[in-house]
């Protein structure tokens, strides 16, 4: 919530000062943004490598049907949410947003030139990082290499430290510079109006996704999906207040067990889904990206977003345990698949964090529906998670 307040203040100041700020002062912030965007582009691929590789290694070491079913269902639910967001946005957004109402968002520093910049090329592109993460993660799990696993975990901790110390604290200043620049070039009004229009749609989509997920679970659990959702409200509001899936796990566990799920099954699925089930996060990112493309008049297609959602659902698993971790992990996919610029990414970050609690609450509450399905599978298959599996990474 502190980060959200800082982001909102940064947007307000950027828009307000953009009407009176002299060019030479604005260029100072443009210079900062130019350097920061280079650093951000450098760190995104290693962020994906640093978090996805150890996450896959953790999952792979817990081989078993329970794990495979949980991962598969979580991915399908996440992908379905992304598709639902795309189809809803493609249907409603053009009616609410007039293409071209805001000129194309440009890279920080294009309207006003920076005094200087520093070129920091990334070590690899995003897809290379994602493939390498899979190779390292699966290989480490298959070979049972403890030293390699320890190294991956250590690398993840270093990247998490770098994000917490160098990106998150500077993010409000970066977004301030983006909105300052956009206001001075006449872009801010159209972008902010677009954001206001789609927030309610995204919230409604989160509720719809939860109803669909619990309706699917009801087919297996033979329960009333609306009663189940009502029972999960404490977890929903806890996540809404904390914006953290991990912090909500104790409440989620208690409510899931209250639905009749076996304690062992709940103890396995809830912590695991807190890492890999990202329906709400994916829904928000897809909606924000589509709205931004429409307001700028960019061409988009179902094929483009189908591939984007498929990669997004993988790249944001085991996102760093920081506010807005999912959107930080998705920046590379936004750039490589949708062609987003640094300014586009900054706008998406701002909108995402403004609704961070909604997405987290959707993720957490949806975990209960997956637990209900896994519990049904466990009863039919006669298998239970091991004690090692119950300690799945959070």
Image (tube, grey):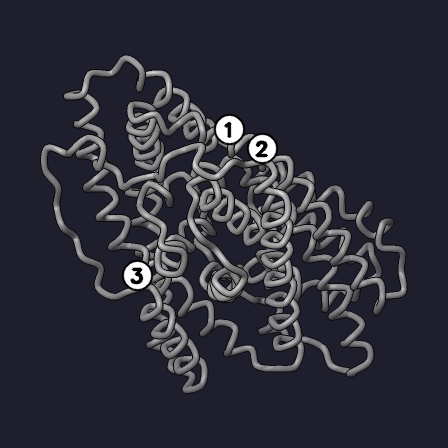
The foreground one among 133 and 89 is: 89
User: Residue at label 3?
Assistant: 46
Most distant residue in the bottom direction: 143
Left or right: where does residue 181 sit relative to residue 57?
A: left
Q: From mark 3 to mark 2, how far is it between C-alphas?
A: 34 Å
Nearer the observer: mark 3 or 1; the answer is: 1
The foreground one among 118 and 299 is: 299
Q: Are marks 2 and 1 in contact (CB under 8 Å)?
A: yes
Q: Residue at x 85, y 67 (%)?
A: 219
Q: Can residue 22 be seen in this snapshot? A: yes
User: Residue at label 2?
Assistant: 197
Q: Is residue 378 above or below residue 366?
A: below
User: Residue at label 1?
Assistant: 193
Q: Residue at x 46, y 56 (%)?
A: 319
Q: Are marks 3 and 2 in contact (CB under 8 Å)?
A: no
Q: From mark 3 to mark 1, how far is it between C-alphas?
A: 34 Å
State the image coordinates of residue 73 (x, y, percent, origin top left).
Answer: 66, 69
The foreground one among 20 and 3 is: 20
């Amino acid at each position: 919530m502190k980060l959200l307040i800082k982001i909102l203040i940064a947007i307000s100041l950027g828009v307000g000062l953009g009407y009176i700020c002299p060019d030479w002062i604005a260029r100072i912030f443009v210079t900062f943004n130019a350097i920061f965007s280079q650093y951000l582009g450098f760190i995104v691929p290693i962020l994906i490598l640093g978090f996805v590789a150890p996450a896959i290694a953790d999952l792979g070491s817990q081989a078993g049907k329970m794990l495979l079913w949980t991962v598969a269902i979580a991915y399908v639910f996440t992908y379905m949410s992304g598709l639902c967001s795309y189809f809803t946005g493609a249907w409603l957004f053009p009616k609410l947003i007039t293409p071209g109402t805001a000129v194309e968002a440009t890279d920080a520093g294009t309207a006003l030139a920076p005094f200087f910049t520093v070129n920091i090329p990334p070590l690899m592109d995003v897809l290379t990082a994602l493939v390498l993460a899979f190779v390292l993660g699966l290989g480490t799990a298959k070979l049972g290499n403890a030293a390699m696993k320890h190294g991956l975990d250590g690398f993840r901790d270093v990247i998490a430290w770098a994000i917490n110390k160098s990106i998150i604290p500077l993010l409000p200043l970066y977004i301030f510079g983006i909105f300052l620049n956009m206001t001075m070039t006449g872009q801010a009004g159209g972008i902010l109006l677009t954001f206001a229009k789609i927030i309610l749609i995204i919230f409604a989509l989160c509720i719809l996704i939860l109803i669909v997920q619990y309706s699917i679970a009801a087919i297996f659990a033979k329960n009333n999906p609306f009663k189940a959702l009502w029972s999960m409200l404490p977890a929903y509001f806890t996540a809404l207040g904390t914006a953290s899936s991990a912090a909500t796990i104790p409440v989620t566990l208690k409510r899931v067990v209250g639905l009749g799920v076996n304690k062992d099954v709940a103890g396995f699925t809830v912590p695991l889904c807190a890492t890999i089930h990202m329906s709400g996060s994916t829904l928000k990112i897809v909606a924000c990206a589509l709205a931004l493309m429409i307001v700028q008049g960019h061409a988009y297609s179902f094929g483009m977003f189908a591939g984007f959602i498929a990669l997004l659902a993988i790249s944001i698993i085991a996102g760093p345990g920081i506010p807005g971790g999912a959107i930080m992990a998705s920046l590379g996919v936004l750039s490589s698949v949708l062609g987003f610029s640094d300014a586009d990414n900054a706008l998406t970050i701002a909108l995402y964090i403004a609704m961070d609690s909604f997405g987290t609450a959707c993720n957490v509450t949806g975990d209960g529906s997956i637990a209900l399905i896994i519990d049904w599978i466990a009863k039919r298959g006669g298998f239970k998670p091991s004690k090692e599996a119950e300690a799945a990474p959070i």
